[in-house]
């Protein structure tokens, strides 16, 4: 029996869990950080919550006899990725990262590229109504500006009242192009703020902003640690797992 740990929180992680669940002699556990109160069914056994840094992850990997680990966390969840890489090296574990290709700019899109979220917030003019698809974790950054009205998309309401000027926009992906256009129009958004997360499903908001002529403030993706073995999607990660199962 091989034991596989998938670090999740993304569609790729869920897809990979679905692919692995019926493979003989493979036991998969998917790990979530626990940021959403009502996560989707992940297809396999799931554990929820942080490990307690690199040392906590090392303990988990050794106590649970994990043989293979796949980091399928979001492209901006770089702390978890760095911890996973460190722990894999120290335990001597077979390790792979799923990293979606970044988005490129389409001709009808007006991109303002910035290095981080603080620069994204600073790039907005006074009076802006930015539609922020940057996650609940970015709330404080946006509310640090009292001269803008952030429209922050969140998966679940969690905190009922928006702290200050602005509002939560509750919705669970995926969103199609028409829905994104309607959302941006009905909220009278003046800008779209996104992280360069990549992926097909999440790109519809950029296409919608392009069609409406809204500037897109886009945060560049942070770098991964050097030397990480990377594949672009769940199918390639599954092939990597099967190769290791066959070699065993
Ligand atoms: P992060 O900054 O890289 O990680 C912060 C801490 O959260 C980690 O050190 C770890 O705690 C814990 N953690 C993160 N992912 C985990 C996982 N899959 N399983 C167990 N613990 C995990 O992560 P983040 O940006 O806050 O993202 C949290 C989760 O949301 C990730 O699973 C990610 O895939 C998902 N997500 C993130 C974004 C985004 O824009 N960042 C967008 C969509 C989904 P310990 O140190 O205690 O182990």
Image: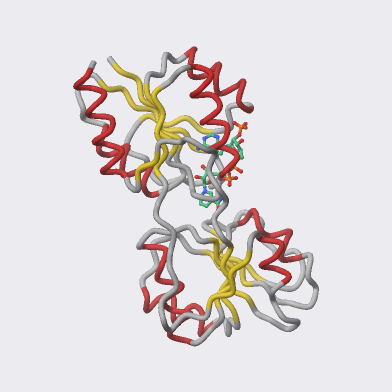
Where does the image place residue 60, in percent across and percent down from the top left? 52, 19
Where does the image place residue 219, in percent across and percent down from the top left? 58, 63
- Using the image as rendered, state which of residue 112 and residue 134 is in the foreground: 112
In this rendering, is residue 103 above or below 59? below
In the picture, measured across the screen, residue 201 lies left or right of residue 61, that is: left
Q: Residue at x 30, y 18 (%)?
A: 2
In this rendering, is residue 75 above or below 70? below
Q: Residue at x 75, y 65 (%)?
A: 143
- For the C terminus, the quadrant is top left
- Using the image as rendered, state which of residue 181 and residue 221 is in the foreground: 221
Q: Quadrant of residue 103?
A: bottom left
In the picture, measured across the screen, residue 117 lies left or right of residue 51, that is: right
Where does the image place residue 223, in percent across and percent down from the top left? 55, 48
Q: How is the image coloured?
A: secondary structure
Q: Count the numbered circles shown.
A: 0
In this rendering, is residue 165 above or below 200? below
- Using the image as rendered, state which of residue 20 and residue 97 is in the foreground: 97
Q: Quadrant of ligand 1?
A: top right
Q: Quadrant of residue 113?
A: bottom right
In the picture, measured across the screen, residue 85 lies left or right of residue 107, that is: right
- For the N terminus, the quadrant is top left
- Using the image as rendered, state which of residue 154 and residue 10 is in the foreground: 10
Where does the image place residue 155, in percent across and percent down from the top left? 52, 57
Q: Residue at x 66, y 67 (%)?
A: 120
Q: Which residue sits furthest front? A: 227
């Amino acid at each position: 029996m091989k034991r596989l740990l998938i670090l999740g929180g993304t569609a790729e992680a869920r897809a990979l869990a679905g692919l692995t669940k019926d493979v003989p002699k493979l036991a998969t556990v998917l790990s979530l950080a626990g940021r959403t109160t009502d996560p989707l069914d992940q297809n396999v056994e799931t554990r929820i919550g942080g490990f307690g840094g690199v040392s906590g992850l090392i303990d988990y990997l050794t106590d649970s006899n994990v043989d293979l680990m796949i980091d399928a966390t979001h492209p901006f969840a770089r702390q978890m990725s760095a911890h996973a890489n460190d722990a894999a090296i120290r335990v001597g574990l077979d390790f792979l990262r799923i990293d979606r290709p970044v988005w490129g700019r389409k001709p009808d899109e007006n991109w303002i590229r910035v290095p981080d979220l603080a620069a994204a917030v600073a790039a907005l003019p006074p009076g802006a109504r930015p539609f922020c698809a940057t996650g609940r974790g970015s709330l404080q950054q946006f509310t640090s500006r009292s001269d803008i009205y952030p429209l922050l998309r969140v998966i679940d309401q969690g905190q009922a009242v928006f702290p200050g000027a602005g509002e939560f926009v509750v919705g669970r992906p995926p969103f199609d192009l028409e829905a994104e256009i309607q959302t941006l129009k009905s909220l009278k958004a003046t800008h779209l703020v996104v992280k360069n997360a990549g992926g097909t499903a999440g790109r519809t908001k950029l296409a919608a902003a392009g069609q409406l002529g809204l500037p897109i403030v886009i945060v560049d993706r942070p770098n991964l640690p050097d030397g990480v073995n990377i594949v672009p999607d769940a199918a390639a990660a599954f092939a990597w797992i099967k190769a290791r199962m066959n070699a065993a």
